[in-house]
Image (cartoon, rainbow, N blue to C red):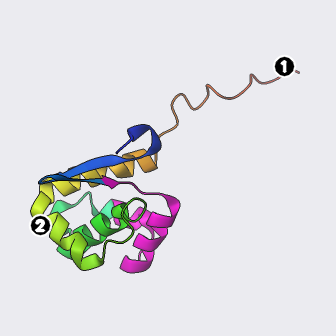
């Protein structure tokens, strides 16, 4: 079951539910597969006109690694086909955001500076 507090997002495909997440290990496997650093992969997703289907399949596959590690790359492509690319990209976007949460109130956790 997907738990957004732990970085997980649900992807419903017919009567099956998959849990997507991007742990450090999943991100490393994604980088290895695509031959790019994760920051470059994330930036490429901001230009939908240039997103390759092989990248979508790789993202789905990598996002499945933590909870469905038996899923092969070709099977990830079938899951993406059945779910639909827009649904997959929405779930991947949410999982990516959960993997890289912005620090809320960056100053909130710091102690006050000592006065000289």
Residue at the image point whose x is 29% and y is 54% from the top: 92
Within 10 Å of disc 2 (Cα), the crowding (few <14, some 14-19, many 20+) is some
Instruction: Give the percent coordinates (x, y) of residue 53.
Output: 18, 72
Residue at the image point whose x is 18% and y is 61% from the top: 48
Within the image, what quadrant is residue 41 found in? bottom left
Question: Can you say whether 19 is above or below 106 in the image?
Answer: below
Residue at the image point whose x is 13% and y is 55% from the top: 86
Q: Which residue is mark 1?
A: 115
Q: Secondary structure at mark 2?
A: helix
Report the span colored magenta: 19-42
Within 10 Å of disc 1 (Cα), the crowding (few <14, some 14-19, many 20+) is few
Marks 1 and 2: CB-CB under 8 Å? no
In the image, farthest residue toward the right: 116
Residue 64 is left or right of residue 38, and the answer is: left
Q: Is residue 33 magenta?
A: yes
Instruction: Give the percent coordinates (x, y) of residue 37.
Output: 45, 70
Residue at the image point whose x is 31% and y is 69% from the top: 61
Residue 116 is left or right of residue 69, and the answer is: right
Instruction: Give the percent coordinates (x, y) of residue 1.
Output: 34, 45
Q: Which residue is mark 2?
A: 81
Within the image, what quadrant is residue 80 found in? bottom left
Within the image, what quadrant is residue 40 found in? bottom left
Instruction: Give the percent coordinates (x, y) of residue 34.
Output: 36, 77
């Amino acid at each position: 079951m997907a738990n957004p507090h732990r970085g997980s997002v649900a992807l419903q495909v017919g009567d099956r539910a998959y849990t997507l997440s991007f742990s450090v290990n999943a991100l490393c496997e994604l980088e290895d597969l695509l031959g790019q650093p994760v920051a470059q992969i994330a930036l490429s997703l901001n230009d939908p006109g240039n997103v390759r289907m092989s990248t979508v399949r790789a993202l789905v596959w990598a996002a499945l690694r933590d909870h469905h590690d038996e899923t092969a790359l070709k099977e990830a492509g079938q899951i993406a086909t059945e779910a639909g690319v827009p649904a997959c990209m929405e779930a991947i976007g949410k999982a990516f955001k959960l993997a890289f949460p912005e620090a809320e109130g960056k100053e909130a956790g710091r102690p006050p500076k000592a006065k000289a």
